[in-house]
Image (cartoon, helix red, strand yellow):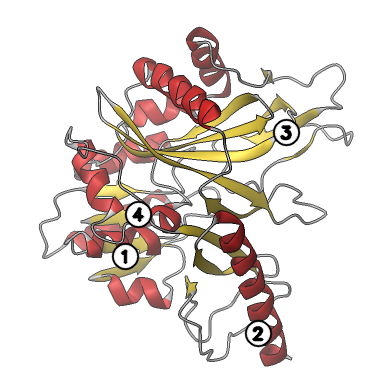
Amino acid sequence: MLIAAASGRALAASARRGGYAPLVADAFGDQDTLAVASAHRQVDLLDRPVDDEKLIGALEVLASGHDPIGIVCGTGFEDRADLLARIAAHWRLLGNAPETVARLKDPLAFAAICRVAGIPHPATSLTTPPDPSGWLVKRVGGAGGQHIRSAGNGHSAPQGAYYQRRIDGVPVSALMLVTDRDLMVLGFSAQWSSPTPRKPFRYGGAVHPAPLPDEMRQAMTTALERLVAAVPLVGLNSADFLVDGATFHLLEINPRPGATLDLFELDEGSLFALHVDACNGRLPARVPAFEHSAASAILYAWRGIAALPPVEWPDWVADRPVDGSRVKAGGPLCTVLARAASAAQARALVDARSAKLHAALDARLS
């Protein structure tokens, strides 16, 4: 199975658990990615523009000598439906069609879908609001929150950006499996940011399950059912909401397996296998049971690292850079994981582990 993503580790590990041999193209080539991948090529899917020819060439090298049954694309293609179409011309795309991704990532088209489906969604504009205070500027197809900033700072929006009314609420994400007929919500996770002065909405981490009353879970699920009836989604997708008391707003759909795979990975079985099954029109008979709460957090580099020295990574660290890696200040260094009996305990544990790892690495790098 071919896998292409900004970071392919979680997809590759789940694919391996599901019985697939992962052939991975990603931007990092971390130790644990290389450990589970049958083959790997490093291609930068983070910077824009993406080098289409380099990616297609890397995938051709990976596929050479193998007979991949298809390709799963993760984060990195949200604003490149044309590249997805090129990939789909070579291999079977196990995921949403390029035209579906383009429709969902068109800010005005998505706002119209929500309006017709009766789903609360923040006001959206391609032009500068008369009073930009209370509005955000977002990059079309952006991911990870690093592209979001306040519109009330006097700066005009860059090309490829749009404006969205700022809404109060707690970030909550729904992970769902979809066929062309049915929807199964696997669960809800609460998210938090890891802000910097220049990137106040940078993604920090998530914990599952989100502390939501049953009525809110049902209302959000019903909204997603209406959306799926209007848009032909398939496979694993996630939906980002803001929840404020008894109200919610749907911010966006991430039309691919995303950042919360680690939280929902099955003790027995594989989310990747469920994704492939859903792309083939099959959902599990029931929602998988999750016996533990889980949290994950991104540990960002607090300073530039010219060459990472050898590190004895704890077993609760994922996305482990290879020795000698160069890490930019503010760039993702690794992912910290935790499991516990409750969401609150999992969040506290992942925070404590992140602080412990930060201190240990800071001392190691001094």
Q: Earlier in the sequence, mark 2 or mark 1?
A: 1
Instruction: In the rendered view, tell whether residue 162 sits above or below residue 193.
Output: above
Q: Is residue 24 left or right of residue 137?
A: left
Label 1 sits on residue = 13
Which of the 4 image quarters holds residue 99? top left
**Amino acid type, mark 2:** Leu
Would you say the residues marked 4 and 2 are in contact, meaning their CB atoms lie under 8 Å apart? no
- Counting the numbered discs, the total is 4
Q: Residue at x 43, y 28 (%)?
A: 102
Label 3 environment density (alpha carbons within 10 Å; few <14, some 14–19, many ≥20)? many
Q: Is residue 184 left or right of residue 75?
A: left
Q: Residue at x 50, y 77 (%)?
A: 321
Label 4 environment density (alpha carbons within 10 Å; few <14, some 14–19, many ≥20)? many
At which x and y percent is residue 352? Answer: 66, 72
Label 4 sits on residue = 4
Residue 361's mark? Answer: 2
Instruction: In the rendered view, tell whether residue 173 sits above or below residue 266.
Output: above
Tell me how far mark 2 sits from mark 3, CA to CA: 34 Å
* Whether residue 305 is visible: no
Tell me how far mark 1 sits from mark 3, CA to CA: 35 Å
Q: Earlier in the sequence, mark 1 or mark 4?
A: 4
**Amino acid type, mark 1:** Ala
Secondary structure beneath disc 4? strand
Label 3 sits on residue = 137
Q: Is residue 84 left or right of residue 268?
A: right
